[in-house]
């Protein structure tokens, strides 16, 4: 069985299974030489009027964040008000599995190393909302069955 490292919210283990779909808090995959991370664009949350966005004032500054803590930062709302058509916050690393309404992307740290055939964990590249048991089974067929051959 291939070993891989999948980073969870606060811990990682080289012994985690690459394809354990029961664990849904994956935000990073290091199964191969390409480091893949799920990132969130907070400006998408504001533009889509996400129901999980909260705001508070501290002094004269208004901050906003995510109630579900998909991204952990509390950001100054003034930057968005000053340029609502730009992505003023950029991408933030997801702290937990993004919700279906989140504007999530996969960032590849060493994208030049990436090939579909060399990817050890193709499930990670799919949206967690689209994980269906049959699709997962088809993608991972043969993974961990080396002893049976």
Image: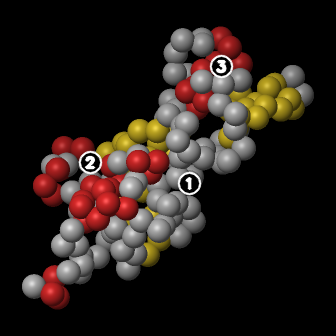
Q: Nearer the viewer, mark 3 or mark 1?
A: 1
Identify the image's colour scheme: rainbow, by chain, secondary structure or one colour: secondary structure
Which disc number belongs to residue 96?
1
Q: Position of residue 115 (x, y in %)?
A: 15, 49
The answer to whether 60 is drawn above or below residue 17 in the figure is above
Circle 2 residue: 110
Residue 5 visible within the image: no
Between residues 111 and 1, which one lies in front from this camera angle? 1
Circle 3 residue: 79
Which disc number belongs to residue 37?
none
**Is the residue marked by circle 3 packed among few (<14), some (14-19), or many (20+) residues within 10 Å?**
few
Q: CA distance from mark 3 to mark 1?
A: 25 Å
Q: Quadrant of residue 35?
A: bottom left
Q: Earlier in the sequence, mark 3 or mark 2?
A: 3
Q: Horizontally, is 38 left or right of 70 in the view?
A: left
Q: CA distance from mark 2 to mark 1?
A: 22 Å
The answer to whether 143 is drawn above or below residue 52 in the figure is below
The structure residue drawn at horizontal position 60% and vertical position 21%, both measured from the top left corner, is 47
Q: Secondary structure at mark 2?
A: loop
Quadrant location, the C terminus: bottom left
Q: Secondary structure at mark 3?
A: helix
Q: Earlier in the sequence, mark 2 or mark 1?
A: 1
């Amino acid at each position: 069985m291939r070993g891989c490292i999948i980073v969870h919210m606060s811990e990682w283990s080289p012994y985690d299974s690459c394809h354990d779909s029961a664990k849904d808090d994956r935000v990073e995959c290091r199964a191969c030489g390409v480091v893949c991370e799920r990132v969130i664009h907070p400006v998408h949350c504001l533009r889509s009027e996400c129901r999980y966005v909260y705001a508070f004032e501290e002094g004269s500054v208004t901050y906003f964040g995510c109630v579900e803590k998909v991204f952990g930062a509390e950001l100054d709302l003034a930057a968005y008000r000053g340029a609502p058509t730009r992505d003023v916050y950029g991408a933030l690393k997801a702290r937990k599995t993004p919700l279906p309404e989140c504007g999530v992307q996969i960032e590849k740290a060493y994208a030049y190393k990436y090939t579909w055939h060399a990817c050890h964990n193709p499930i990670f590249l799919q949206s967690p909302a689209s994980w269906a048991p049959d699709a997962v089974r088809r993608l991972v067929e043969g993974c961990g069955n080396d002893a049976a051959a």
